[in-house]
Every structure is written in C-alpha cells, then in structure tokens.
Image: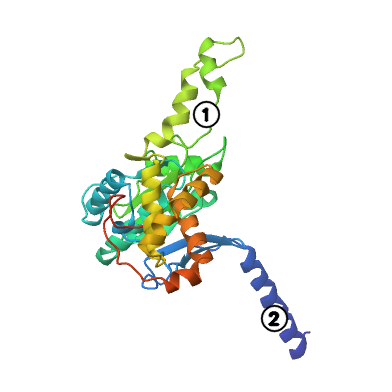
C-alpha cells in the first residue's frame, strides 16, 4: 500500500522522467510568429527543430549594389514573377567570391517584402529537413524563398540528395509559394576530379558506363532553372565600389581620391578585388582617419566617372 507522500513522490519522479524523455525525443516543427520578421533561420538545438525570426535583417537595397546590373536584372525579374504568383525558377548564383551573390538575394527580400516575400535561411547540414519546411509554409499566403548560402557538397552528403529531390524529382512537389535560392563558388556544387574525365579511357577496373560519373556531378546544378554567374571585378569596378563605401562612411571626395593608391595596395595584399575587400578597406581607412575626416568639409554624394551611386555589400 502506498501512502500519500510516497505516491506524490512517485508521481513527481515520473513527471521528471517524462520531461527528460520529451527533451531528447524529436519534436515536430512549430510555426513561428510570422509577423515577427521578414526573414527566418532554421536551426536544430538539442534535437529540436526551430524556425527563429531574424530580429535585425540586413538593410541592403537594390540601388546600393554596383557593377552587377545584368545579374541584378535577372534575379529581380524572377523574384517579381514569383511574388506576383506567376511561374518562376529556383536560382543558383555562382562565381567569384565577394561579388555580391548573397547581398543580391537580401536586397530582393527588402525590395519585395512589402508584397509578401519572406526568406528562410537553411544550412546545408539541415537540408534533409526541407520537406518539413515546405509542409509548414504550404498553406501560408506569403511567398517564401529558402536561402542556402555558400552551398557546396562533398561526396555522399545527405543534404545533396534531399535538395536534389526537392528541386525536381520527388513525388511530393514543392508548393507554389516556395522557391530555393542558393549561392556557391562552385558551378556544379560538387568537387570535380581529373579522374572523372580519365574514366573515359575505359580503365580495366573502371566503371562500365564512365559518362554517368559526369552526369551525376552536374545533375544537381541542372535542376536549378536559372543560373546567375558573377565574375571578378576589374580595377576600375573595384575602385568605384570602394569609393562608394567610403562615401557611406562620410569620407570627403578629396580624401577618397587620395585613398586610391592605398585602396589598390590593400587589394594587392589580399589577392582579390572583390566588393568584400573594397568594403573592408573602406572600414579600415575611415576608422584610421576618423578624426582628420571629421575636420574636413563633407562633399555631397554625386555620380562620378568611376561608376553610379551605390554600395556593394559584403
């Protein structure tokens, strides 16, 4: 026979045990407060899947991006179609590092968020959960871009197959209100080896169908309906971007002209003339000369021969 105190103690221990079990068991994905932000982050913590609102979304405008006009026009057109409810494509943005691939996606989000565009950032390790995310937002009135930044895979990664099926191949198609935008420095997202081409020589211990090695390598990137390619900036383009970043830090025009040589040396030391390097130089220069620049008269921002008004973003 159990006494009341013993029974209460047993019940308390059972509840504690159930609480611990619930903490380690997989939990269903719960919808966030969709009004909390225009961007969300998918995360896994202690076995639980969370969709967290991004409290401070990067404030990048399309007009702030320099030297990527063709790429900007293509992504803008596709996103406008999507937001309007017309057919649109999943997009793969590839090419040189630091040239504004991620920034362009963020700028599109800011441009179209008043019309219902929302963004969900997903790490490649969590791409296996894409079907759950698509199911969660399928009945929402908003239009969702699932954003995968700096995407590339090694052989055999689970997320590769999941993304491939979601793009085109799964029996359960993604809803009309979901697109996938991904950025990568690799056009085909997988490492390509010389031995893949050498397999065409029909080695005695090689594959019976060597051409299928190459087919598998490019099959994922081909499932993105739109490819947007980015290229290294020329010296003039790099200087134009750096100049506009300096203007954003309130550096006077005469100081910007005087900083030209330092800007070129900075790029030489970094081995790159990307927009990211231009931004880093502008931060360093304006920080080092902050006191001197405050004493100099501030010149208004104008369109110069070096390029149109605007800022390239990291």
| Mark whose residue sits in front, 1 or 2 | 1
Residue at 57% from the left image edge and 20% from the top image edge: 195
Left/right placement of residue 221 relative to residue 4 reads left
Residue receiving disc 1: 192
161 to 72, vertically: above or below: above
Secondary structure beneath dot 1 equals loop
Left/right placement of residue 21 relative to residue 271 reads right
200 to 186, vertically: above or below: above
Q: How crowded is mark 1: few (under 14 residues within 10 Å), some or many (20 or more)?
A: some
At which x and y percent is residue 136?
40, 60
Indicate which disc residue 13 carries.
Answer: none
At which x and y percent is residue 76?
26, 51
Number of numbered discs visible in the structure rendering: 2
Give whichever of 306, 146 is nearer the camera: 306
Q: Residues within 10 Å of mark 2 (few under 14, many from 20)?
A: few
Give whichever of 256, 42 is nearer the camera: 256
User: Taking the image as drawn, is residue 283 in sight?
Assistant: yes
Indicate which disc residue 11 carries.
Answer: 2
The quadrant the N terminus occupies is: bottom right
Give whichever of 72, 175 is nearer the camera: 72
The quadrant the C terminus occupies is: bottom left
Residue at 43% from the left image edge and 50% from the top image edge: 275
Left/right placement of residue 115 relative to residue 227 reads left
Q: Do the residues labelled 1 and 2 touch (CB within 8 Å)?
A: no
Secondary structure beneath dot 2 equals helix
Q: Outermost residue toward the bottom? A: 4
Residue at 36% from the left image edge and 71% from the top image edge: 297
At which x and y percent is residue 303?
26, 57
User: Taking the image as drawn, is residue 3 in sight?
Assistant: no
Query: In terms of sequence position, does the residue under pointer 1 or pointer 2 come before the other?
Result: 2
189 to 48, vertically: above or below: above
At which x and y percent is residue 281?
49, 55
């Amino acid at each position: 026979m159990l006494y009341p105190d013993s029974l209460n103690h047993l019940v308390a221990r059972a509840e504690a045990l159930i609480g611990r079990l619930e903490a380690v068991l997989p939990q269903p994905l719960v919808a966030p407060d969709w009004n909390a932000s225009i961007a969300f982050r998918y995360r896994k913590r202690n076995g639980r899947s969370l969709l967290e609102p991004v409290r401070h979304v990067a404030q990048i405008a399309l007009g702030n991006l320099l030297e990527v006009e063709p790429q900007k026009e293509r992504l803008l057109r596709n996103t406008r179609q999507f937001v309007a409810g017309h057919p649109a494509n999943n997009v793969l943005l590839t090419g040189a590092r630091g040239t504004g691939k991620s920034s362009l996606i963020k700028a599109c989000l800011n441009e179209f968020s008043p019309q219902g565009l929302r963004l969900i950032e997903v790490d490649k390790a969590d791409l296996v959960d894409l079907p759950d995310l698509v199911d969660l937002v399928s009945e929402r009135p908003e239009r969702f871009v699932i954003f995968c930044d700096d995407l590339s895979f090694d052989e055999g990664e689970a997320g590769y197959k999941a993304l491939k099926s979601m793009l085109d191949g799964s029996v359960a198609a993604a809803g009309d209100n979901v697109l996938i935008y991904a950025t990568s420095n690799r056009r085909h997202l997988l490492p390509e080896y010389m031995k893949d081409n050498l397999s065409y020589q029909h080695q005695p211990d090689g594959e019976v169908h060597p051409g299928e090695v190459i087919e598998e390598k490019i099959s994922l990137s081909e499932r993105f309906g739109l490819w947007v390619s980015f290229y290294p900036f020329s010296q003039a383009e790099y200087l134009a971007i750096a100049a506009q970043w300096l203007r954003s830090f309130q550096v006077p025009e005469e100081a910007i002209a005087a900083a030209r040589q330092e800007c070129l040396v900075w790029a030489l030391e970094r081995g790159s003339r990307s927009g990211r390097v231009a931004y880093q130089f502008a931060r360093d220069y304006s920080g080092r000369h902050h006191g001197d620049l405050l004493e100099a008269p501030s010149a208004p921002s104008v369109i110069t021969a070096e390029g149109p008004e605007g800022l390239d973003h990291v």
